[in-house]
Amino acid sequence: MLKKNGIQLTSLLSIPLLLSLAAGCGTASDQSTSGNMASNKGTVAVGGKDFTEQRVLEKMTAIYLKEHGYQVNESTNLGSTVAWSALQHGQIDMYWEYTGTALVVYDKQPAESQPQVAYDKVKQLDAKSGLSWLDQSQVDDTYAILMSKSEARKDGIKTISDLAKYVSQHPSFKFATDNEFYGRSDGLPGLEKKYGFKFATQDVVRMDAGLVYNALKDNQVDACMGLSTDGRIKAYNLVVLKDDKNFFPAYYAAPVVRTDTLKKYPGLKSLLNKLAAKLSSDAMTELNYEVDVQHKDPSEVARTWLSSQHLI
């Protein structure tokens, strides 16, 4: 999820500078320990967006490829549109994207709730732009509407329809959102239209995506947007309201790679597909929890998981 996904309106002219600033030398946990670096199968530029799950996926991919003999240049903390444009224009070779984000935001298509249909559509559409969607993982990082379990139980709110009815009857119900969800058609505007309600403008509090969970936990707001694989849902005793009208589309994560890069390094496809096959929503939630709640380093979390799955 874009998570969901940190859209920025940065011009294409600024992309090389952003990538230069975002590219890091890496920590000790990033470095290959297998000796495969000596084989030097090629150099791959791996990107990642600006939220925890993407940082973990980017580090995971970088470490994985290094262990299998590739040199890796990393570009992290990119906004969604910056990452997508960088991929299109060759500043990066690959990153993990979500089917729903690509379909709605980049390809300007209607949202799709069926995972395979969404995947097939983006794969076909983006192939025309020289981008290849590899196998999608079982990580569905869709948007979610969250409340504290105690407050939701007290107010009898189990579904988003329940929330819509409650908000219509109770003014000053405060809702926290990041800027991306606030403006996206598959975010707040579409949600309000689908469910037939509207938060008062003064009651919508916009903040960084990483802060919405704390605002809800600390009772600064009554509900917030979130991502379904975020570890803080469990840690903060929050509840995901049931999307009973199936508004939110499928947001399955998959590696998206420039087609010319795959032609140059044909071994990448099988490697990345093997990695994607190991990932699930439950696994991703646990990894996000370790970073956001236990404050572990994303590189260490990624390397430990790769080892546990016998991928390195």
Image (tube, rainbow, N blue to C red):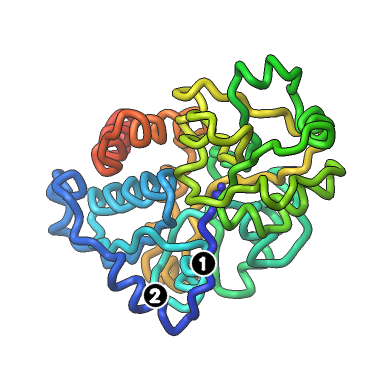
Asked whether the viewer can see residue 212, the reply is yes
Q: Residue at x 14, y 44 (%)?
A: 33
**Rendered image quadrant of residue 16:** bottom left
Residue 8: mark in rendering: 1
The amino acid at mark 2 is: Gln
Q: In this image, 15 relative to 116: left or right?
A: left
In the displayed image of the protein, which residue is found farthest to the bottom? 13
Looking at the rendered structure, the secondary structure element under dot 2 is: loop
* Distance of label 1 from label 2 (alpha carbons): 17 Å
Residue 221 locus on image (x, y percent): 58, 36
Asked whether the viewer can see residue 2, the reply is no
Q: In this image, 289 relative to 242: left or right?
A: left
**Rendered image quadrant of residue 241:** top right
Q: Residue at x 84, y 46 (%)?
A: 194
Q: Residue at x 34, y 36 (%)?
A: 291
Q: Residue at x 47, y 70 (%)?
A: 87
Q: Residues within 10 Å of mark 2 (few under 14, many from 20)?
A: some
**In this view, 150 is above or below 2:** above
Residue 99 locus on image (x, y percent): 62, 52
The amino acid at mark 1 is: Gln
Image quadrant where one finds the C terminus: top left
Residue 159 locus on image (x, y percent): 76, 27
**In this view, 205 is above or below 23:** above
Q: Earlier in the sequence, mark 1 or mark 2?
A: 1
Residue indicated by mark 2: 91
In the displayed image of the protein, which residue is found farthest to the right? 196
